Amino acid sequence: MIPVNELIRGYNLYKDEYEAKAIEVLRSGWYVLGKEVDSFEKEFAAALGDDCYCAGVDNGLNAIRLGLEAAGIKEGDEIIVQANGYIATMLGIIQAGGKPVFVEPDEYFQLDADRIEAAITDKTRGVCLTHLYGQCTRMDKVLEICKRNNLMLFEDCAQSHFASYKGNNSGLFGDVGFFSFYPTKNLGGYGDGGGVVSRNKEIIDKVKVLRNYGSDVRYHNIEIGVNSRLDEMQAGFLRIKLKHMPELIANRNHIADRYLKGITNPNVTLPKIAEGCNHIWYQFIIRVDDQAEFREFLKENGVNTDISWKVPPYLQPCMVDKYGYKRGMFPITEAICDSIVTLPMMDVMSEEEIDKVIDTINKY
Ligand SMILES: *Cc1c(COP(=O)(O)O)cnc(C)c1O
């Protein structure tokens, strides 16, 4: 059975380096927020773009929450998000005191800029888009609309490490970018991790205070902070993986290219790549009319698939309870959820495996 993902494959690629780093950190006598975290923050920021800063945190959800808090999001502020986004984005916004306000996505699965202005109220403080599945949002219009309406712009980049638009990496288009380094992410560690990036050093400094009990210097607490620290082991692993990102992205691009050229079944709609966008293929998402039947056929023939996600965030029970959203409110999103299928995509796949996925789909 070909899995949708298998993390051990990525680990095995650079096994010796990871294992040497684990021993180095264990023997260093320093385990949380230290020189590995410091170095990772600097190296990651430098790799993303010029004049920017990074604060490492313990996961992507807390990156969102603390990044928004540091940027001044307060109780009652409305943040515009795409209705087909991930629940973690919504939870981060809510935990920062904000309220997610949904709009429909475009044909590339990204937030539809043309729908932002209709969702603005006198409480709207910002837009938080997600560069979903590894493709950067087309930023020109979003930037123009945010500027014209005096809105802050946040980017959830948990699926878009080094995905770019017109040569610029996601994460630095707006005020603050949020990253997850969860093991499945393209730049993922071997445990939890997250990061906040910004060109505004004050915001990053504030995240660094908030993540460590709100303390600016040891035993001096200036904010009601949390414990959201990144550990040295993960930062060390992430430094290794960061160096190998060009190869890892090339591997995924090769798999995606083979799928795009090889899958010819007319029942399948392949993902579209927008002009100016560099896709990093966090996930390869196709659309079919008969989602359940299609997945069953692939499974019977040895190819596992997934759906991300069958239930959109506004229809999750916790969101229905809190805000009263109902099925039918975002028909484009619901049509997406009822037709998307996640194909196998990972750090390494053999040519035989890629062939098998393509042939099985074409036989359907
Ligand atoms: C994975 C993910 C997150 C959350 O990251 P964690 O590190 O798992 O907390 C947030 N947003 C998106 C879009 C994600 O894919």
Image: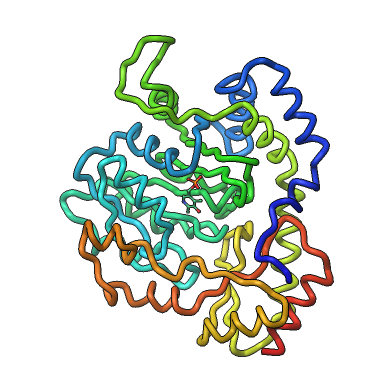
Q: How is the image coloured?
A: rainbow
135 displayed left or right of 143: right
The image shows a total of numbered marks equal to: 0
Q: Nearer the viewer, residue 314 or 170?
A: 314
**Quarter of the image containing the C terminus?**
bottom right
Residue ID at (57%, 81%): 269
Q: As drawn, is 225 to the left or to the right of 272?
A: left
Image coordinates for residue 360, horizontal then vertical, percent: 72, 83
Nearer-the-camera pick, 279 or 364: 364
Residue 63 lies, with reference to residue 338, above or below; the image says: above
Q: Residue furthest left?
A: 122
Can I make out residue 53 in this image?
no
Q: Point out residue 15 in the picture as x, y percentages from the top left corner.
A: 80, 41
- Above or below 75: residue 277: below
Judge left or right: residue 292 versus residue 312. Answer: right
Task: Give the residue displayed 34% in from the left and 51% down from the top.
Answer: 127
Residue 250, located in which quarter of the rendered image? bottom right
Say which of 267 and 301 sits in front.
301
Q: Quadrant of the N terminus?
A: bottom right
Q: Nearer the viewer, residue 106 or 349?
A: 349
Residue at image point 72% right, 55% down: 347
- Whether residue 164 is visible here, answered yes or no, is yes
Q: Residue at x 37, y 28 (%)?
A: 226
The image shows residue 285 at horizontal and vertical percentages of: 57, 70
Whether residue 17 is situated above or below residue 209 in the rendered picture: below
Q: Position of residue 249 (x, y in %)?
A: 70, 53
